[in-house]
Amino acid sequence: MPEWIKLTARDIFDGRRFLGEDKVLVMRPDGAVEAIIDRSEAGEEVRRLDGWLSPGLINTHCHLELSHMKGRIPEKTGLPDFLTTVMTQRQPDSPEQIAEAIAAAETAMLEAGIVAVGDICNTVNTIPQKQKSNLYYHSFVECMGFVDASAPARFAQMQEVYQAFRQLDAAGVHTTTLSPHAPYSVSATLFRLLSDLREEDPITIHNQECFAENMLYESRAGAFLGFYKNFGMDISGFRATGQTSLPSYLPYFQSPGNMLLVHNTFTSEEDIRFAAGSAKNIFWCLCPNANIYIEDTLPYIALFREQGGVMTIGTDSLASNHQLSVWEEAKTLHEHHADVPLEEIMQWATLNGARALGIENTFGSFEKGKKPGVTVIDKDSKKVSI
């Protein structure tokens, strides 16, 4: 007879809904969920925790490798200026600073009850930390290059990074895919190279994070023209499509599989409807604290909910955020959108995130046989040691 782990709290959120008081989460010694039962049926040795219980939280968008940039970039400058600062100040004061910042950021995510992360990678800097298997990671190795002529070289360069991350996949707590960075940083040729991969594992893209991105595609105007000029980039080959960015790039991707669209701060109802007809399973990732940090605005969430959009939550990086807590993002969403039930936001932070990363068979909900981890939430979120 196994020694059951029995946990109770003020309430239990199972990944879809709050179950109310007087419930007990029963798990096996290895952390696998057995059942949720009434307190009257649970017998002795029930451990009561302050707050309420949730499956481990899923951070579907993070840049762990930028953790050393915490506090370096001024807030609310707009995306083109933010990107300029990242590109010019990305190098750390010392090589050791990167590894130390990555380790500290991962520890903070663990302590905040995060169990899985969709992590953006431009370098191999996070591999040593990921080898420790403290969290489940899906590493999105990011391709960028807005000049068509450089697309083959850029693609080959990131293939090398991709193969380095693929070495981690055999452990079963890590997966990898190549993904485009953003519409304003990926040329038509590079989009075609990436779409030819026909990835069935999740891919991602930064989507409509600023108004200038849509202006670029609609009329070849806006703040990105100055950004390209500042870095000496020849974009003479770029042609405006007369549409916003999303319908301009999404048709490149016609293979099945999940696609995370991240930020979506300037996504319209028409864009959402267009995405609904995509060959991809579209997930809309919100990073509200980063949106406030960079653009001082938030997506119009009502549009996504009205159109049945499937939402997830990310934190972005410590270059654009003060912390990497999914619960802090959930609180910000609830504070700014009091009409959205907390129960719904919590599903974005758990089960929807697990589905987006393709790990819902293990994470995201308290269902028999799963090992989703347990997070206790009160004012803060904390990992529960079991």
Image: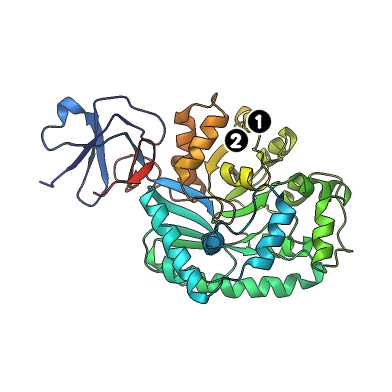
The foreground one among 38 and 321 is 321
Look at the picture and state if 268 lies above or below 226.
above
Is residue 289 something one can see in this rendering? yes
Residue 150: image x %, image y %? 77, 72
Residue at 54% across, 35% down: 333
Query: Label 2 sits on what residue type?
Result: Gly
Look at the picture and state if 196 lies above or below 288.
below
Look at the picture and state if 382 lies above or below 81.
above
Is residue 196 something one can see in this rendering? no
Look at the picture and state if 226 lies above or below 165.
above
The foreground one among 110 and 295 is 295
Dot 2: few (<14), some (14–19), or many (≥20) neighbours within 10 Å? some
The foreground one among 325 and 29 is 325
Which label belongs to residue 303? 1
Task: Determine which residue is flagged by label 2.
Answer: 309
Which label belongs to residue 6? none
Dot 1: few (<14), some (14–19), or many (≥20) neighbours within 10 Å? some
Q: Earlier in the sequence, mark 2 or mark 1?
A: 1
User: For the residues marked 2 and 1, what is the alpha-carbon distance in whole angstroms?
Assistant: 8 Å
Residue 84: image x %, image y %? 72, 61
What is the secondary structure assignment of the residue under circle 2? Answer: loop
Residue at 16% across, 32% down: 42
Choose mark 2 or mark 1, whichever is in front: 1
**Seen in the image, is 120 located left or right of residue 20?**
right
Query: Label 1 sits on what residue type?
Result: Leu
Q: Are marks 2 and 1 in contact (CB under 8 Å)?
A: yes
Residue 355: image x %, image y %? 48, 45
**Seen in the image, is 326 located left or right of residue 377?**
right
